Image (cartoon, rainbow, N blue to C red):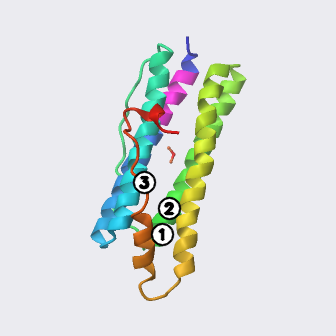
Amino acid sequence: MLNKKMATAINNQIQEEMYSFYLYLAMAEYAADKGLPGMQHWMRNQAMEEMSHAVRFMNYLEEKGAAVELKTLKAPPKSWKSPKHAFEEALKHEGHITGCINNLVDLALSLKDHATVNMLNWFVGEQVEEEATAKGVIDMINLTGAAPGGMFMVDRELAARPAAVDPMNPTAQA
Ligand code: FEO
């Protein structure tokens, strides 16, 4: 049995992860509009990862016999000042998600819910990676500076991101 407060908080997190999916999808469309297929590929794969995070939480609620409640998603922004600005906003968003995960851990600890703490530990590690990855892209854009063709080179790097795993089978990923 999962504590009701914990189940509600996890359902709220599913909404956060699905909004993240939506946000990265919007960034992918922005990239396509700017003629950056590598960035579009990167953002679409990030969107798929976010969906896999939502499905991980759904699977956990199911395993614990708690109901999954899908909530309304707000519309994400449509454009950003520049590709770099989009990645800066992505990093800011990941900081917000890290805070959400930390709050979930705090709640689980206060309820002495060790199974949920254990499940959440995967997300604690994942958030370190997500923030580092977004920061890495910002650093790469900064390094190219105003060099001619700089963003073209970054875009080629972004195109090399490996395809995301099937989001409906999230535990297949490392
Ligand atoms: Fe699901 Fe990017 O955090």
Main SS, magenta region, reads helix
Image height check: is 47 above or below 4? below
Task: State the image coordinates of residue 142 (x, y, percent, origin top left).
Answer: 56, 77
Which residue shows up at 61% across the image and 24% down it?
A: 116
How dense is the environment of label 1, judged by Cα within 10 Å: few (below 14), some, or many (20 and up)?
A: few
Q: Is residue 43 magenta?
A: no
Which residue shows up at 41% across the image and 23% down it?
A: 68
Task: State the image coordinates of residue 5 (x, y, percent, origin top left).
Answer: 57, 22
Task: State the image coordinates of residue 56 (x, y, percent, origin top left).
Answer: 47, 31
Alpha carbons under labels 1 and 3: distance apart: 23 Å
Question: Mark 2 — residue?
Answer: 89
User: What amino acid type should be assigned to the residue bearing mark 1?
Assistant: His
Residues drawn in magenta: 6-14
Camera-nearest residue between 161 and 118 = 161
User: What amino acid type should be assigned to the residue bearing mark 3?
Assistant: Pro
Question: Mark 3 — residue?
Answer: 162
Q: Give the tally of numbered discs.
A: 3
Image height check: is 67 above or below 80? above
Q: Quadrant of residue 126?
A: top right
Camera-nearest residue between 123 and 113 = 123
Which residue shows up at 43% across the image and 77% down it?
A: 153
